[in-house]
Amino acid sequence: MSATSTQLKHEVKDINLASSGKQRLEWAGREMPVLRQIQERFAKEKPLEGIRLVACCHVTAETAHLAIALKAGGADALLIASNPLSTQDDVAASLVADHGIPVFAIKGEDNETFHRHVQIALDHKPNIIIDDGNDVTVTLLQERKQQMSELIGTTEETTTGINRLRAMFKDGALTFPAMNVNDANTKHFFDNRYGTGQSTLDGIIRATNILLAGKTVVVGGYGWCSKGVAMRARGLGANVIVTEIDNVRALEAVMDGYRVMPMSKAASIGDIFVTLTGNKHVVNSQHFDAMKDGAIVCNSGHFDLELDLESLRSKATDVKTVREFAEQYFLPNGKSVVVLGEGRLVNLSAAEGHPSAVMDMSFANQAMACEYLVKNRGKLEAGLHSIPNDVDEEIARLKLKAMEIEVDTPTAAQTEYMNSWTVGT
């Protein structure tokens, strides 16, 4: 590692972990061909030259490749963690030491440290913010309004963050363009469903080493992330119950073959509970009381408030760490509940997050969204903007090409038929 790199302002657990992080980065890169191609183009074209960029994300090997691509494109990038338990400390060290990217992220950092890192990020005076959950953006609006004139726009890839942006727009607070990366087809169809589905169960199994076959798994919500978890849990032999507040999604879950009921009824039936709604207190105090002795509860939504852990802690007569990522709460009714990963994203707190192959597309969308914001600086209206269809299509094309999969090309007659209303049957 160079002396210059290690002299960068940064806050990581141990810079000497860089060699381990470098190996992790190299392994992840094998499965990220789309982002690699974008990085190569960025290095030639420099579309982000002179742009100050802050990324508040899960600091993983996959995110590191996004940061490297953005720097290759000319961005002056700084990275902080969006979740206290998702940081891979060796990756953070490698980004600083091997790639000269300032990182402020430590696995297990407390709320005070996180908020200090948010302030450090805003001290960077960003033109673009990549913001998982929108904490940096909200802080900018509430505490640093004088910096708003420097902001070109933001990008957001979490359901929770998109919900917050929509609320901001409704309240008239969204005074800048924000790219809705989460709803890109090459993001939510794959990352949310296949990435979350696999990595969430990976986290549960690593934290508990339990057999899922024959267990009753209660999945909170039936959005794309929840669909992935329900699908993978059933694939491992679990009996799946879905809870929902949306009638259409509930109906879809029924048609997909799952039992659907309120959480109040599912609470006494489930063996394992997973929330993925983007809402608060999906599992509340009354639900904890109704659960079986030894029920396992975890969350794979962005914020830990999906579980009402404050009420659980207040009523618990004792708390015991039974495994590295599992805490057993003993209740006055004589039963106990096991919480995984402190209620944080279980796929990142107890495992390694989404597989690199699926994050390849998500982060390709992030990189292209940043380029789009810069190219259209001053032209985009305030509000949420979708990823352009041609960008979505190009990412899918590059992914298929890397997988050596070919698709049909429509004939001229077929193209005419699809685009005409005068051609009959």
Image (cartoon, helix red, strand yellow):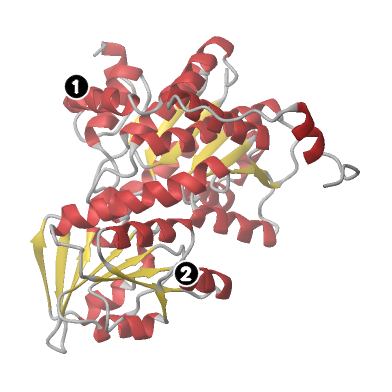
Q: Residue furthest bottom?
A: 333
Q: Nearer the viewer, residue 415 or 211?
A: 415
Image quarter of the N terminus: top left
Name which of mark 2 and mark 1 comes first in the sequence: 1
- Which quadrant of the structure image shows residue 81? top left
Residue that appears at 18% across and 79% down: 316
Residue that appears at 46% across and 45% down: 190
136 with respect to 13 (left or right): right
Point out the frontmost of discs 2 and 1: 2
Query: x, y (%) of residue 391?
Result: 62, 32
- Which quadrant of the structure image shows residue 213? bottom left
Residue labelled with disc 2: 253
Residue 63 sits above or below residue 194 on the image: above
84 with respect to 79 (left or right): left
SS type, badge 2 = helix
Q: In whole angstroms, how far apart are the C-alphas of marks 2 and 1?
A: 46 Å
Query: x, y (%) of residue 369?
Result: 59, 34
Q: Give, as a three-letter code, the residue at label 1.
A: Ser
